[in-house]
Amino acid sequence: MALEARLRLPLARPTPATAFLSGSNPKQTHLSFSIKTTSTSLSAANAPPPIVVVGSANADIYVEVDRLPLVGETVAARAGHSLAGGKGANQAACGGRLALGPTYLVARVGNDANGRLLEGALADAGGVRLDRVARAPDAPSGHAVVMLMPDGQNSIIIVGGANMEGWASEVDPEDLDLIRQAGVLLLQREIPDWVNIQVAQAAKGAGVPVILDAGGMDAPVPGELLGLVDIFSPNETELARLTGMPTETFEQISQAAGACHKMGVKEVLVKLGSQGSALFVEGEEPIRQAIIPATEVVDTTGAGDTFTSAFAVALVEGKPKQECMRFAAAAASLCVRVKGAIPSMPDRESVMSLLESAQAE
């Protein structure tokens, strides 16, 4: 049964969330609403270390269209609505529902209606600790326009807002303290690269694995950041864009992953959509994982974030990489059956049930 818990960070001293913009005076604020935590069979002492997600939180404006408009063309949408999303929030929501230990989100939202939408949705998601989500008073919440096609595929345009503008010139020391206690750090590219670099440095110094999801800004990944990453996770399109190499066949994907190895990343976890996924570890044979077919594909918006987060959950629990990929494939299969990113995140019981069913077939 879900329990109501006040937001509280389990560090040695109180840690109020800090909301400020670069160049402004810090203002201490608390996100004072309650969150739902998921019960587990493990005691707090025996639970895995926390998953910490540093990343974006967006209000996703969905428009359901039969096709994308051409240049200069206007098309009518069949429906439209707003839902909480953003790669950081998606991954945190997924971790909160799947992980046996706590999941924290470090993010910035605006002091506006979209910010309150995001806070409420994350609180309702279950299991996400929001102590380190702060409001940036002078920047609007990030948002995205998601154009959803009838087959569940989508195209997305992002407006950064507080995700890009709401950080101080240095990451809060309390955030860094939390990261040093993590079992894994999850990053994406919808926040400034310098933020990712600072938090990855803290994680690396404490021996915490760093997973970087390549999704986000259309720009080269700084070499300094790649050098701090343990597992780099693009989809095939992002892999092609970042390496400048074709990724139409598995052999081409392998070669592009090899280029990432030369950039300093030892493990490349590639999400291949309907073709499943593949993990390329430098000096080893690739590990491939097929999809676990969904009964119906409704919306693929949060599938990649679900996969990456579920992989991290299994990794923190000490599972072998092949098992991590299978766990992630099951979570992604459940995700695409529901509309919306955060609303579609599956719970642990559903993932384990699907794995058992798939193994029996």
Image (cartoon, rainbow, N blue to C red):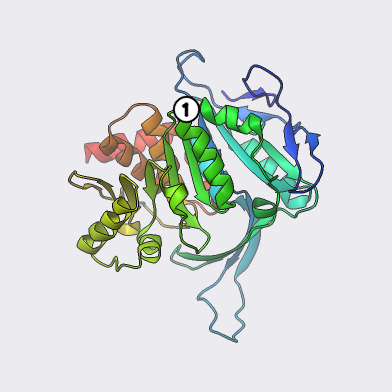
On the image, the x and y values in percent for residue 158 come to 60, 62
Q: Is residue 337 visible?
A: no
On the image, the x and y values in percent for residue 81 come to 65, 60
Question: How many dots with numbers?
Answer: 1
The secondary element bearing badge 1 is classed as loop
Q: Is residue 206 visible?
A: yes
Image-based side of 8 in relation to 309, left or right: right
Q: Quick one: which residue is furthest to the bottom in this view?
A: 72
**Quarter holding the N terminus?**
top right
Residue position for label 1: 206
Q: Nearer the viewer, residue 173 or 6?
A: 173
Image-based side of 16 in relation to 313, left or right: right
Q: Quick one: which residue is furthest to the left in this view?
A: 285
Which picture quadrant has residue 247?
bottom left
Q: Nearer the viewer, residue 45 or 100?
A: 45
On the image, the x and y values in percent for residue 231 come to 37, 43
Density class for disc 1 (Cα within 10 Å; few <14, some 14-19, many ≥20) is some
- The residue that appears at 31% across and 44% down in the rendered structure is 266
- The residue that appears at 69% across and 41% down in the rendered structure is 119
Q: Is residue 183 above or below residue 199?
A: above
| Mark 1 residue type | Ala
- The residue that appears at 38% across and 57% down in the rendered structure is 235
**Quarter holding the C terminus?**
top left
On the image, the x and y values in percent for residue 225 come to 46, 48
